[in-house]
Amino acid sequence: MLTSQAVKNEARRLGFTLAGITTPEPPPHVSAYENWLMLGRHASMEYLAGERARTCRRDPHLILPDCRSILVLGVRYPDPKTVEPDDKAGLRGRVAAYAWGRDYHLVFPQRLQSLVTFIEQELGSPVPNRWYTDTGPILERDLAQRAGLGWIGKNTCLISPKLGSYFLLAEILLGTDLEPDPPFAADRCGTCTRCIEPCPTHCILPTRTLDARRCISYLTIENKGEIPVDLRPRMGNWTFGCDVCQMVCPWNRFAEKEYDQSFAPYPDLPSPELIAVMSLTPQEFNRKFKDNPVRRARRDGYLRNTAIALGNSESTAGFPALEGALQAGAPLVRQHAEWAIKQIRKIR
């Protein structure tokens, strides 16, 4: 007989730090999600607002009609505070810690399939299933909280009392019954607002949602166009994503430091050299970020972000790289390089 504990033990053997089980009932925060969409806080991410995306998030059975259990999994990535670059010149950028190593979209699938295979072998028959890792129309943090893995913090991240929030989630919808875990009912944020106050762009709202239109992670990754001028100085040296609201969270202060080695940093990625990045050719960019999340920003987007970071550096040492972008860069890069040069001159 297959037990929930046996499945969770196998999940941990495969490298998943967190494992919990819940039921396929509608998630508790569907109405909050719908309101978030209605207010336009999803920015240009229209794939979140399509009819199928919305209806499937209301009812997981629309994804897998035979769904009877949902297995929610998590893997820990590095704590961004473990890397403090020597940046006396102010010419290094910052990349969100989840993106320092191999892309989790490439790491998780084999583990998820192996877990499904284990379940089918234990049951002695095929099991209807569908798995996702940040790729499907489900409210994964809602499901994770209901599977007992933690609570949704004021910064919108799922927080585990033992592991903090530096982990990535995945889910397997299963057409077999597994004993669900009790939901994580406690809200351990209390009156703390440490994640809200230091947000550089003030994108975190008091409703435990955020306005993606102002979020540095959205601006540097999902946004493929111009970054609003008023937000550029607030971005500091972040060139891909942002960890500020997690770095200040007290629950990450005492969390375990061990992480999955699949996400060990690539050379220079925690703190890329901004001037060197500006000279990357398309071929060099593809080679440097092969199998790494930074590729999602695309080269022009990454150079756009880097130009802003150089503008915020206040250093004239970046002028040659920025002027080179003015001469040979794509229109998106040229526009932000021009802003960066003016920004440095204004400060000087």
Image (cartoon, rainbow, N blue to C red):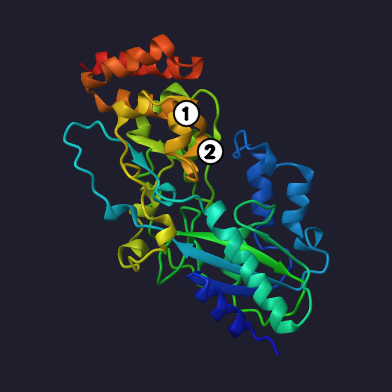
191 or 82, which is in the foreground? Answer: 82
| Residue in the image at 56% along x and 74% along y | 11
The amino acid type of the residue labelled 1 equals: Gln
- Cα distance between the residues tagged 2 and 1: 15 Å
Q: Which mark is residue 337?
A: none
Q: Please give left or right for residue 257 compared with residue 304 in the image.
A: left
Where residue 199 sits in the image (x, y, percent)?
Answer: 38, 43
Is disc 1 placed on a helix, strand or loop?
helix
The amino acid type of the residue labelled 2 equals: Arg
Where residue 242 sits in the image (x, y, percent)?
Answer: 41, 43
Labelled pair 2, 1 in contact (Cβ < 8 Å): no
210 or 119, which is in the foreground? Answer: 119
- State the count of labels: 2
Badge 2 or badge 1: first in the primary sequence? 1
Tell me if mark 1 has few (under 14), some (14-19) or many (20+) residues whose alpha carbon lies within 10 angstroms of its own.
few
Q: Is residue 185 visible?
A: no
- Image quarter of the C terminus: top left
Q: Is residue 27 visible?
A: yes
Q: Which mark is residue 283?
A: 1
Number of the front mark, 2 or 1: 1
Which residue position holds label 2? 296
- Say above or below: 330 vs 183: above
Where residue 248 sits in the image (x, y, percent)?
Answer: 33, 54
Which residue is situated farthest in the left direction here? Answer: 88
Is disc 2 placed on a helix, strand or loop?
helix
| Residue in the image at 33% along x and 12% along y | 323
- Say above or below: 298 vs 345: below
Tell me if mark 2 has few (under 14), some (14-19) or many (20+) residues whose alpha carbon lies within 10 angstroms of its own.
some
Choose top left, top right, bottom left or bottom right for residue 275. Answer: top left
